[in-house]
Image (tube, coloured by chain):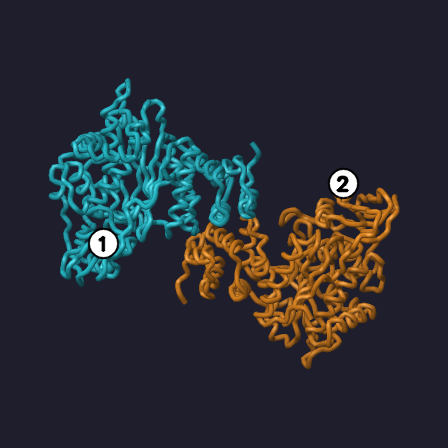
Chain colours: A orange, B cyan
Amino acid sequence: MNPFHPLDVILRKRDGHPLSDDQIQGFVRAVVDRTPDRPLITDAQIAAFLMAVFWRGLDTRELATLTSAMRSSGDVFDAASLNTFTVDKHSTGGVGDKTSLLIAPILAAAGLENPGPDGVPGICVPMISGRSLGHTGGTLDKLETIPGFNTQLNLDELAATLKRCGAALIGQTPRIVPADRTLYALRDHTGTVESPFLITASIMSKKLAESLKALVLDVKVGSGAFMPTYEASRQLADLLVKTGVISGTRTVALLTRMDEPLGRFSGNWVEVWECVDILRGIRHPMSHDLIELSNIMAGWMLHLAGRASTAEEGARLSDRILSSGKAYQAWLGIAAAQGGDVRVFDDPAARHKPAARRVLMAESSGYLASMNCKQVGWAVQRLGAGRARPGDPVSAHAGIESHAKLGQPVEQGQPLFTLFSEDASLLDEPEQMLRETLQISSTMPRIQPLIRETIPSA
Amino acid sequence: MNPFHPLDVILRKRDGHPLSDDQIQGFVRAVVDRTPDRPLITDAQIAAFLMAVFWRGLDTRELATLTSAMRSSGDVFDAASLNTFTVDKHSTGGVGDKTSLLIAPILAAAGLENPGPDGVPGICVPMISGRSLGHTGGTLDKLETIPGFNTQLNLDELAATLKRCGAALIGQTPRIVPADRTLYALRDHTGTVESPFLITASIMSKKLAESLKALVLDVKVGSGAFMPTYEASRQLADLLVKTGVISGTRTVALLTRMDEPLGRFSGNWVEVWECVDILRGIRHPMSHDLIELSNIMAGWMLHLAGRASTAEEGARLSDRILSSGKAYQAWLGIAAAQGGDVRVFDDPAARHKPAARRVLMAESSGYLASMNCKQVGWAVQRLGAGRARPGDPVSAHAGIESHAKLGQPVEQGQPLFTLFSEDASLLDEPEQMLRETLQISSTMPRIQPLIRETIPSA
């Protein structure tokens, strides 16, 4: 192993030359191992390197090496001892996207039906999720509205829950991919967040720390997507898939439409409520797109896990598992195993107690033509459901209910959104934000399909 | 004035958009005004910004604004009170380049001959110089081999010396362009040194802090130049001239050949010795290129100061001032005013007392065809004359004497270089470095002219 020189690595990347595996591994080790007494690399050097990567990019090998080095910078979940098929999904984030709360129990139910010889479910979902930030929601914030639900399991507790329940939904710990924690904090204040290469390394290092055999990625496109253009989302999807495949994980990415909130509710408890309804067989018309996307993603996961000969067959299997109530049983098992008080699922609507609500009505008749979905996400955040900064508190009961979907005919005075908040003074600005962004047109708009593209293509 | 947001500035430059003057000024102020209690900008943000500038460049207005904001970040020499024509030169650094020690007294002599109504020399050279670093020499290190010579004058002492002597040669102080001190230290370890834009801002902010009416720049090209290619040197020269002109300084840049050491000696005291010889009328054949370049640059300075109708006429005037002994008288005045013991100039050869010397002989007959002049500079540094790191000590007596110039016929066994050091053990490596880099060919090589180009062209 050659000694690591931060400047060499910066200069090579700056000048557009590929980095050796040694150099990339040395960089990640220096980021993690540095201390005030051993300044193996400075913040300024990390920032200069990140900006050089933003500029020059990484080739497939460099990206795989960076991802792998980041993955190995901390604790890694040891799936080998479980003798199961580990599979997970990841979404680049959207508004009202609660598919994890459906997909995890669907896959768990499939795994529990087919245990291995040692009784471990044949499929396990070791799902490590994130929190709401900016205009996007976060699975952990939703789960934590369930009384007693503990998302802070360590890796041993994760394994134990998987053995019993087939899935667990937990939060990132400081010991999982510590390199990403340092790099992300620096990227956030040095203008190096939006690099598809750095995004890929960040996402995939954390997902691969789950020791997955298969991974299905939902890369959002449209006005609510993190990436600014379709092409940027497509490039990110390509990089994510390539990086997964190189690491030996069967990886598929779906480019999916995020130009309106997914499903009926956007918020925290309201999203749990929506999922519990679905798991219990109640399919509200506004939840149609959510159910469709969840079945398609779960279908891919079942297919990659060998439980369906095609993704389409997998999607049909997923829907059957959902309809049968088996996914709900799996969900009750997971929630209980993680300390949740499952009695709240008996009447989830009753727990929704926002102090203030307001209905936003259509100002004219026509077709609901478009909205800036990011703006809708920010309105949800301002209602109290999300956070502008890491560490801010979130409200369980704030959020919005969608009463119409894009392309649908609406009449003047018809409710389009109901806004919920724990403080009536918080309603005005989000109402204004939503009002400004909703477009009603007299002609029927062209609405894109939910799944825009699948990578790799069939 | 809008509040300064570091991230906005990084993102705009990263995405290739021009920065407003407010943003650039805000950046420089934040760099200078930040304290641990007021972290207006972090090292990481500065580094990310510098890498973004390395990538995207700066347009002429942005560069002029950055340079001006850096210049104004600390003390500025107030030349108005002197009522004189301030002029200076700057070189991008080379091996054996001691033109400052000739040009300053030549211009001072011209100024002393034509004082203004209040007795101040009509031309003044407020020369702020640097130290040796890497393969290049530094004027301050040479001057400090003169017993008693004090380069650490403050700006009041600088003004007093100029009034009396027409020139002063001093070092940078922490209060002159403090922004450059911070930025340079960060550039040095984040791989952002070689940006022509950042180099221009660094050079010109310091030169313009001298409140110059005219400036002549020597931008080196060839194997000993800092910039890697002719085109890179040319781009730098263009940027330097544009930035000078925008600030109201008459500015000319010469692209000059640095593919072998300039003059007879490279080192510290040996370079003073060579200049004292020339000032006293002793013109060693090996000093020919040094005298030519000094006269051409001084000629431009005299022309810009209105003392010659063309640069060529200025060069002839410069040579007359040199031959007449007036430049030597001016030199004695400057040296004495800065505390130097001028008796050492009576027999400078006698003061050259290296503990060890070695002669490097031609290994074959032919023409001296080429050398890597940067390698020669590093050999001089390894002999003890230079420093690899800021703050390292330098030897007064180490260095080399050149016995042949490129293009000259040489015979096997003829001396090419004599190496001097204060420690015999330091001779082997530099000898090897020189031996490796010298090329003797059987055909006459094509040698470029000393002045490759003048910007702006006539």
* Residue identifier under label 1: B407
- SS state under label 1: loop
Q: Nearer the viewer, residue B369 or A189?
A: B369
Q: Is residue A305 above or below residue A2?
A: below
Secondary structure under tag 2 reads helix
Q: Position of residue A295 (x, y in %)?
A: 76, 66
Whether residue A129 is visible, yes or no, is: yes
In front: label 1 or label 2: 1
Report x, y in % for residue B140: 27, 40
Q: Position of residue B84 (x, y in %)?
A: 31, 24
Spatial CA span between label 1 and label 2:
79 Å
**A47 to the left or right of A214:** left
Residue marked by disc 2: A432
Q: Is residue A79 left or right of residue A107?
A: left
Return the residue nearer the eye: A442 or A355: A442
Name above or below for residue B198 compared with residue B432.
Answer: above
Q: Residue at x 24, y 47 (%)?
A: B262
Left or right of A439? Residue A394 is: left
- Label 2 amino acid? Gln
Name the quarter where the N terminus of chain A is drawn: bottom left
Q: Chain of mark 1?
A: B
Q: Residue at x 46, y 62 (%)?
A: A19
Assign the C terminus of chain A to one quadrant of the image.
bottom right
Q: How many marks?
A: 2
When asked about the image quadrant of residue B321, the answer is top left
Q: Which mark is residue B239?
A: none
Q: Is residue B421 visible?
A: no
Amino acid at the residue labelled 1: Gly
Residue count near mark 1 (Cα–Cα under 10 Å), binned few <14, some 14–19, many ≥20: some
